[in-house]
Image (cartoon, helix red, strand yellow):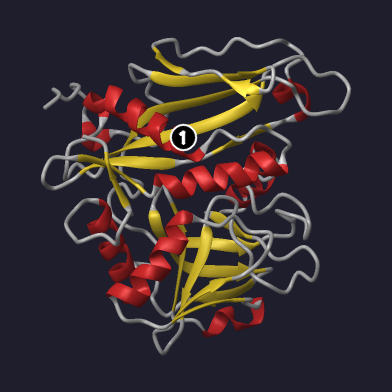
Amino acid sequence: MMEKKNIDWANLGFGYVPTDKRFVANYKDGAWDDGCLTSDATVQISECAGVLQYAQTCFEGMKAYTTEDGRIVTFRPDLNAERMESSCKRLEMPVFPKDRFVDAIVETVAANGAYVPPYGSGATLYIRPFMFGSDAVIGVKPASEYQFRIFTTPVGPYFKGGVKPLTIRVCDYDRAAPHGTGHIKAGLNYAMSLYAIMDAHRQGFDENMYLDAATRTKVEETGGANFLFVTKDNKVVTPKSNSILPSITRRSLLVVAKDYLGLEVEEREVYLDEVKDFAECGLCGTAAVISPVGKIVDHGREICLPSGMTEMGPTTKKLYDTLTGIQMGRLEAPEGWIKVIK
């Protein structure tokens, strides 16, 4: 058993804390090298690197956990590998092979085992794989050399001092075009969402609800999470669209709803007009699993969810407890969901 670092786990925020090792692989002359772990946290690239000039970069986000019985595990890394493959293909970047991706995750987390927060602390080890164009590109075209890296950082519980349902607004800005890059995890999607989220904060809202760009009548997602709704007759509904990111947390929650809680699930187009009729609403993603939403404001018109502003709705809470139970080893996981690291 690796000795844990002397960190105040209970008071960790959601920020970057460098750990001992990170994985680095380079792509050159049409092939990836073997890659290795390094202690160097700095990146050296040309001032004219493709990533700096034309934003050719994509990333993933996932976590490692200490389970109740003391193992270190990660959650469905094969899906992160597949999603990164889609991102790379859409951005004309070389794919880092899926089996090598998963192996590199295991190797990096194992090397930083002392930073995986202890079971019950509420903290986790966040894992960030990313790739970028590293050689000089001045004409608009894909880079010819790339770097793939994975770093880890311990992060605190997303909800400090308990769950507070969020107040979100219907946003006037578009997150993604109908045939754009909304379905991949490209850095550029996040860059263009920064003004909208800061503007929401300045207006007193926690998050944005983005609508489809074509008709502005359908719910898409927020900048960093997918929506999940619960109807008054306890059906779990999630928006279907080609321009939202396929959240691994959301896909997992739908399986949990159906197979563990026996609920009916629907993945379909969700119209803004029907949001007022839902009983519960949550935002799902790696960081918080589910963040409950208490109020949605559509240009001054308030939609207050029956689940209220004090706590998670009952079905959302069951979904949250079940999925975190699976991740932390308290509940039996579906085949292939948990990758044991050590």
- Looking at the image, residue 204 sits to the left or right of residue 186; the answer is left
Q: Residue furthest bottom?
A: 233
Q: Name the residue under label 1.
A: 101
Reply above or below: 216 against 108. below
Query: In the picture, residue 174 is in which quadrant?
Result: bottom right
Residue at 31 percent across and 81 percent down: it is: 262
Q: Can residue 165 be seen in this view?
A: yes
Name the foreground residue: 292 vs 146: 146
Name the foreground residue: 239 vs 332: 332
Residue at 55 percent across and 76 percent down: it is: 303
What amino acid type should be assigned to the residue bearing mark 1?
Phe
- Looking at the image, residue 190 sits to the left or right of residue 320; the answer is right
Query: In the picture, residue 215 is in which quadrant?
Result: bottom right
Quarter of the figure that contains the C terminus = top left
Reply above or below: 239 against 209. below
Q: Where is residue 138 in the image (x, y as percent from the top left)?
A: 85, 18
Q: Position of residue 129 (x, y in %)?
A: 49, 33
Q: Position of residue 120 (x, y in %)?
A: 16, 45
Quarter of the figure that contains the N terminus = top left
Reply above or below: 237 against 203. below
Reply above or below: 90 against 293. above
